[in-house]
Amino acid sequence: MFKTPIGEVTKEQRSNAKAVNFGIVYGISDFGLGEQLGISRKKAKEYITEYLEQYSGIKIFMEEITKKATEEGFVETLFHRRRYIPELKSNNYMVRQFGSRAAMNTPIQGTAADIMKIAMIKVYREIKKRNLKSKIVLQVHDEMMIEAVEEEKEQIKEIMKQSMESAMDMRSTTNSRYIRSNKLV
């Protein structure tokens, strides 16, 4: 992102790169990015432009998913969960911009949520199958909190690792074909 060798990347650069990466995919403006990073709007615009030039597939994805959502009225996660986006047909520019961000965000963040739900079900079923006393307490984004009985700690670590890593194989032929056919790559 900042043309810095990986070993020399500072914590601040990593944080800024993360903000740029997620911000762009979710439709952040140069003004919004500048505010978030505490940099000028001009510098933020340079970051966005350079990023989209370097990763041209992301720009294509953003344009195509918004166009498709405008035409069809909805977007889908990889598991075909739909989000309808009537905002894309609004006469109000700000409302349409919100719709555009939702169109870009939903297939990514929604699919991540779907995968997390699958992982949680796998963890729950394995805990029940083994008749363990530990239980799922909370899930936030890509994290799951388990209230584990001390003597079950190692089993729970194994269950969580296996369940979360196997929730969805993004490299499988079926998934790859679906992703390519919908131009998500």
Image (cartoon, rainbow, N blue to C red):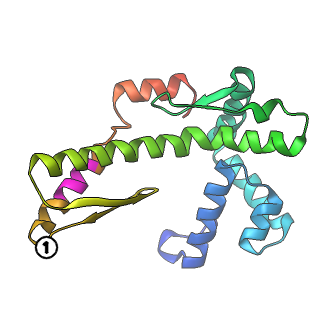
Task: Give the residue drawn at x 83%, y 42%.
Answer: 95
Q: Which residue is pictured at 70% across the width and 33% down the height? A: 85
Q: What residue do we see at 62% from left, 56% from top? A: 21
Tell me where residue 20 sits by quadrant: bottom right
Where residue 19 appears, as percent x and y from the top left, is: 63, 63
Q: Amino acid at mark 1?
A: Glu
Image quadrant in which the N terminus is located: bottom right
* Residue 45 vertical position relative to residue 118 in the rendered view, above or below: below
Q: Quadrant of residue 147?
A: bottom left
Rendered view: 164 above or below 2: above
Residue 183 in the figure: left or right of residue 86: left
Residue 115 image position (x, y, % from top left): 39, 43
Asked which secondary structure carries label 1, the reply is helix
Q: Residue at x 16, y 52 (%)?
A: 127
Magenta-colored stretch includes residue 153: no
100 displayed left or right of 55? right
Q: Quadrant of residue 184?
A: top right
Mark 1 Cα within 10 Å, few/some/many (few <14, many 20+)? few
Residue 107 visible in the snapshot? yes
Magenta span: helix, strand or loop, mainly?
helix
Q: Position of residue 174 (x, y in %)?
A: 37, 24
Q: Nearer the viewer, residue 81 or 131?
A: 131
Residue 146: x, y in percent? 27, 63
Residue identifier under label 1 = 150
Q: Which residues are magenta?
A: 158-163
